[in-house]
Image (spheres, rainbow, N blue to C red):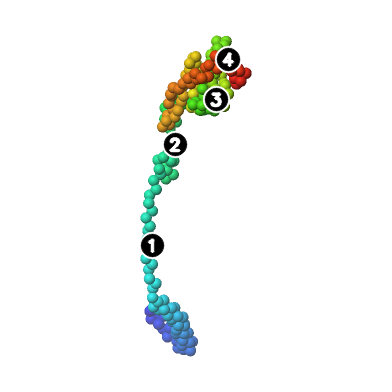
C-alpha cells in the first residue's frame, strides 16, 4: 500500500469513525454466524464417525453345477454350439439308398397281411399271365402276379411257378435297407382241393 492510499484511509477513518466501527462489528457478526452454522454440520460428522460399522456379510458359497452333456442317442444339436449351415455340395455327394422302398407307393391288399399268415393254394394261367393264388387267414383267396407286393416287409413277387411264389423283401437295419429272399410254398393240403375244382373262383377277390 503506497503512501497516498494510507493517507486517504486515515482521512476516511477520521471523518467517519462511527461508520468504520460499525463495519467491523458487522464483519465480526457474520463470521460468528458462519461458525455457528457450521458447528451443526461438524457435530453431525462426529456422530456419524462415532457409529459402529455393520459387519461385512460373508461371500455366498458358489454351488457346483454338474456339466450337462447332450446324449448322442437323442441326435439333437447342442444349443450352446454355434450353428453351421450344411454345405449343399456335401449333401449332393450323399448317395441314396438303392434298396430303400418307395414310401409314396400305395399299398396293395396283401401288404396288410403278415407273410406267415398267407398260403399259396395254386396258380391260374391265361392270356400269357401266370397268377398265384394266395389264401389269407380268414379263408379269402386273392390272385397275385409278378411285380405285385405281399406281406408287411415290402415283399415284391419276382417269380411264380407251380410250386412256389418267390418274393424279395426289404428290411431296415442300422438305418440301412437290406434285401432278403422269401417264399410262399404251395400248400399240399390245398392242392388237392384245387385239383378237384372244389374252389369257387368267384370267391377269388381282386
Q: Which residue is mark 3?
A: 136
Comparing labels 3 and 4, the label whose residue is closer to the camera: 4
Q: Are marks 4 and 1 in contact (CB under 8 Å)?
A: no
Q: Give the answer, above or below, for where 79 lies relative to 112.
A: below
Nearest the camera: 38 or 87? 87
Q: Is residue 43 left or right of residue 109?
A: left
State the separation of the CA atoms marked 4 and 1. Answer: 93 Å
Quadrant housing the C terminus: top right
Question: Which x, y percent locates residue 13?
Answer: 45, 86
**Residue bearing mark 4:** 197
**Residue occupying the point 46% across, 26% down:** 170
Residues at marks 3 and 2 touching, judged by CB atoms closer than 8 Å: no
Near mark 4 (Cα within 10 A), the count class, few <14, some 14-19 or many ≥20, is few
- The reply to whether callout 3 and callout 1 are in contact (CB within 8 Å) is no
* Closer mark to the observer between disc 2 and disc 1: 1
Callout 2 secondary element: loop
Mark 4 vs mark 2: in front: 4
Which part of the image, by quadrant, shows the N terminus? bottom left
Residue marked by disc 2: 85
Residues at marks 3 and 1, CA–CA distance in whole angstroms: 75 Å
Residue 60 badge: 1
Q: Give the crowd class for mark 3: few <14, some 14-19, many >=20 residues within 10 Å.
A: some
Q: CA distance from mark 3 to mark 2?
A: 51 Å
Q: Nearer the viewer, residue 37 or 106?
A: 106
Rendering coords of residue 89 (x, y %) = 43, 29
Q: Is residue 102 visible?
A: no
For label 1, the SS is loop
Amino acid at each position: 500500500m503506497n503512501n497516498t492510499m494510507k493517507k486517504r484511509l486515515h482521512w476516511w477513518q477520521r471523518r467517519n469513525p462511527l461508520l468504520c466501527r460499525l463495519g467491523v462489528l458487522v464483519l465480526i457478526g457474520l463470521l460468528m454466524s458462519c461458525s455457528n452454522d457450521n458447528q451443526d454440520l461438524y457435530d453431525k460428522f462426529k456422530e456419524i464417525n462415532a457409529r459402529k460399522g455393520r459387519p461385512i456379510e460373508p461371500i455366498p458359497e458358489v454351488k457346483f453345477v454338474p456339466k450337462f452333456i447332450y446324449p448322442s442317442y437323442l441326435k439333437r444339436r447342442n444349443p450352446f454350439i454355434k450353428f453351421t449351415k450344411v454345405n449343399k455340395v456335401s449333401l449332393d455327394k450323399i448317395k441314396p439308398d438303392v434298396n430303400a422302398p418307395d414310401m409314396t407307393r400305395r399299398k396293395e391288399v396283401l401288404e396288410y397281411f403278415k407273410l406267415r399268415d398267407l398260403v399259396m393254394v395254386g396258380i391260374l394261367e391265361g392270356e400269357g399271365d401266370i397268377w398265384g393264388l394266395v389264401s389269407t387267414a380268414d379263408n379269402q383267396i386273392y390272385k397275385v402276379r409278378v411285380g405285385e407286393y405281399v406281406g408287411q416287409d415290402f415283399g415284391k413277387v419276382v417269380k411264380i411257378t407251380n410250386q412256389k411264389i418267390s418274393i424279395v423283401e426289404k428290411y431296415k437295419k442300422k438305418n440301412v435297407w437290406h434285401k432278403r429272399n422269401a417264399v410262399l410254398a404251395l400248400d399240399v393240403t390245398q392242392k388237392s382241393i384245387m385239383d378237384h375244382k372244389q374252389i369257387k373262383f368267384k370267391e377269388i377277390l381282386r
